[in-house]
Image: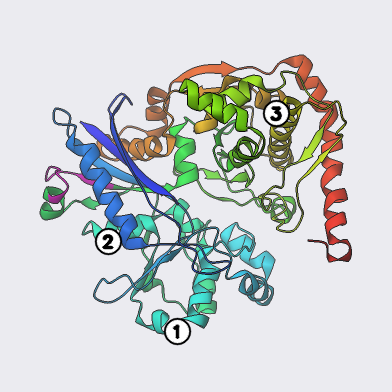
């Protein structure tokens, strides 16, 4: 038997099939574009997304003839939802995480409802990315759609609906709506009442790994699947990725190194604290039932390396084109090998946690005429790693102590970059053999549901590391001394941008 994990992301969807030993058998991917009809709007055409999901399931499963798919689970981006009419029609596009149109509503509504009360129910602090505030925007600005909508589904539950099943939203994904009580594991009546939304217009919440149902005969036939395929509740993409990287104990976390960098740990009980609340570090369900998680992230990550390539790396781009190589690999291999005397605040985009700062800009301090381009590149990547160390430091003070990280994503392929991160964070970083950890985590949940095996045991069997990169102690000691200096950088730079309203 084999198991399919479907990942529904912001820029594309992919399906990967694994056998019962966790070996990847096939995969398929489709890309789609984020639509920005005006400033602050970021949407997806939900019809196109679902069509792409059907395509990748059909392609990935269709090439596995001798080991047919018996179960499917979904890893989904958070926050985005689609309004559905009584006839099943999609009444509008899905607003994705980066959509900021509800910024003013997030502030005023939260003040009225009570910021602390909202945090203690949902485990999250207010931000316009969350479904709650996007729904309020829709209610106030598109009352025609609000009234016509029979339901509002996130992409996991929308896919269930399109597969002919009762829509189910996993607890981790429900947590990202800010409509869900993360301790009671149910939609919050108090929040829904304040919004004017009935729970009947939302999907049924289920723990990750619970069975949603069997694929109807005709849908299964259309997808080239058998009549005995079980659909299982998956989760929000970050905790699915963590599970797929083998995170199932409290001392480990996944380090997703992509456009955005994100660290996702697991802990045994929900952690609510004044510091986590003030630092915007959330608490919600993990993909292992009974465990909880958070997401610590920097919106400046691999995109900073892309910026450096595009603006300062033209000779490497030309060299890569001639030689048939990857320009990123050339740049990273030429990057300074030792710590620099520079220090960088990596806010080339709005920050992520802990500050949720949209105004403060990035800064490179310590430049001289003798500074080399290779040093600037290293300093930029050091800055991102120091920002992630700041997040880990906050989590540790709150009781979530991460001792080892597992790297996934495109950045995990370059050992020199991983070594830099291990040195800055002063923690070993394992490199996962399977890069599609989100799909693997979903497939693990599917396997556990039909086999009866504990999902943590499956994670131990399936996840294989190609290498564990240990920190270089001499460089780690250097960064231990740099870290307090880094902590002083944000207050100084943010004050500069607040003064006189500088933009």
On the question of residue 75 being in view, the answer is no
Q: Could you tell which of marks 1 and 2 lies nearer the N-terminus?
A: 1
What residue sits right under mark 1 in the picture?
Answer: 143
Relative image position of residue 356 (x, y in whole percent):
69, 55
Identified at 72% across, 42% down, the residue is 346
Q: CA distance from mark 3 to mark 2?
A: 43 Å
Mark 1, other Cα within 10 Å: few <14 / some 14–19 / many ≥20? few
Tag shown at residue 330: none
Q: Nearer the viewer, mark 1 or mark 2?
A: 1
Question: Is residue 502 rendered magenta in the image?
Answer: no
Label 1 SS = helix
Identified at 62% across, 20% down, the residue is 333
Quadrant where the N terminus sits is top left
* For residue 70, above or below residue 51: above
Relative image position of residue 49 (x, y in whole percent):
34, 56
Label 3 SS = helix
Would you say the residues marked 3 and 2 are in contact, meaning their CB atoms lie under 8 Å apart? Answer: no
Q: Could you tell which of marks 3 and 2 lies nearer the N-terminus?
A: 2
Q: CA distance from mark 3 to mark 1?
A: 49 Å
Q: Could you tell which of marks 3 and 1 lies nearer the N-terminus?
A: 1
The answer to whether 326 appears left or right of 61 in the picture is right
* For residue 369, above or below residue 162: above
Identified at 19% across, 33% down, the residue is 63
Tag shown at residue 425: 3
Res. 338 image quadrant: top right
Tag shown at residue 161: 2
Identified at 55% across, 70% down, the residue is 133
């Amino acid at each position: 038997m084999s198991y399919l994990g479907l990942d529904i992301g912001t820029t594309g969807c992919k399906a990967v099939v694994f056998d019962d030993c966790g070996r990847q058998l096939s995969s398929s991917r489709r890309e789609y574009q984020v639509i920005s009809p005006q400033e602050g709007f970021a949407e997806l055409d939900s019809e196109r997304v679902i069509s792409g999901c059907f395509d990748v399931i059909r392609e990935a499963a269709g090439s596995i003839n001798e080991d047919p798919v018996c179960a499917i689970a979904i890893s989904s981006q958070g926050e985005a939802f689609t309004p559905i009419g009584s006839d099943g029609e999609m009444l509008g596009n899905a607003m994705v995480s980066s959509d900021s149109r509800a910024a003013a509503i997030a502030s005023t509504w939260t003040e009225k409802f009570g910021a602390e009360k909202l945090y203690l129910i949902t485990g999250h602090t207010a931000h316009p990315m969350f479904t709650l505030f996007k729904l309020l925007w829709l209610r106030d600005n598109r009352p025609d759609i609000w009234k016509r909508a029979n339901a509002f589904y996130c992409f996991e539950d929308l896919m269930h609906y399109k597969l002919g099943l009762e829509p189910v939203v996993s607890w981790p994904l429900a947590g990202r709506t800010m409509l869900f009580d993360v301790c009671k594991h149910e939609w919050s009546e108090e929040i829904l009442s304040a919004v004017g939304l009935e729970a009947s217009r939302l999907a049924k919440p289920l723990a990750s790994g619970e069975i949603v149902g069997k694929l109807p005969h005709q849908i299964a036939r259309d997808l080239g699947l058998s009549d005995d395929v079980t659909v299982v509740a998956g989760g929000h993409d970050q905790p699915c990725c963590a599970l797929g990287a083998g995170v199932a104990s409290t001392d480990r976390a996944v380090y997703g190194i992509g456009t955005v960098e994100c660290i996702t740990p697991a802990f045994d009980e929900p952690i609510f604290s004044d510091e986590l609340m003030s630092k915007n570090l959330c608490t919600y369900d993990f993909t292992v039932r009974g465990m909880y998680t958070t997401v610590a992230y920097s919106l400046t990550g691999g995109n900073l390396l892309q910026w450096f390539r595009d603006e300062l790396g033209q000779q490497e781009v030309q060299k890569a084109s001639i030689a048939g190589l990857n320009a990123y690999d050339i740049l990273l291999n030429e990057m300074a090998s030792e710590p620099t005397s520079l220090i960088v605040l990596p806010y080339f985009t709005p920050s992520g946690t802990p500050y949720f700062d949209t105004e403060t800009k990035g800064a490179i301090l310590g430049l001289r005429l003798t500074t080399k381009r290779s040093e600037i590149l290293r300093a930029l990547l050091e800055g991102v790693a120091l920002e992630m160390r700041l997040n880990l430091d906050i989590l540790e003070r709150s009781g979530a102590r991460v001792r080892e990280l597992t790297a996934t994503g495109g950045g995990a392929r370059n050992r020199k970059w991983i070594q830099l991160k291990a040195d800055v964070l002063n923690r070993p970083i394992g490199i996962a053999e399977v890069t599609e950890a989100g799909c693997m985590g979903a497939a693990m949940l599917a396997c556990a549901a039909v086999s009866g095996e504990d999902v943590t045991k499956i994670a131990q069997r399936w996840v294989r590391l190609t290498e564990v990169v240990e920190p270089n102690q001499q460089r780690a000691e250097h960064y231990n001394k740099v870290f307090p200096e880094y902590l002083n950088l944000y207050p100084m730079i943010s004050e500069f941008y607040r003064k006189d309203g500088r933009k």
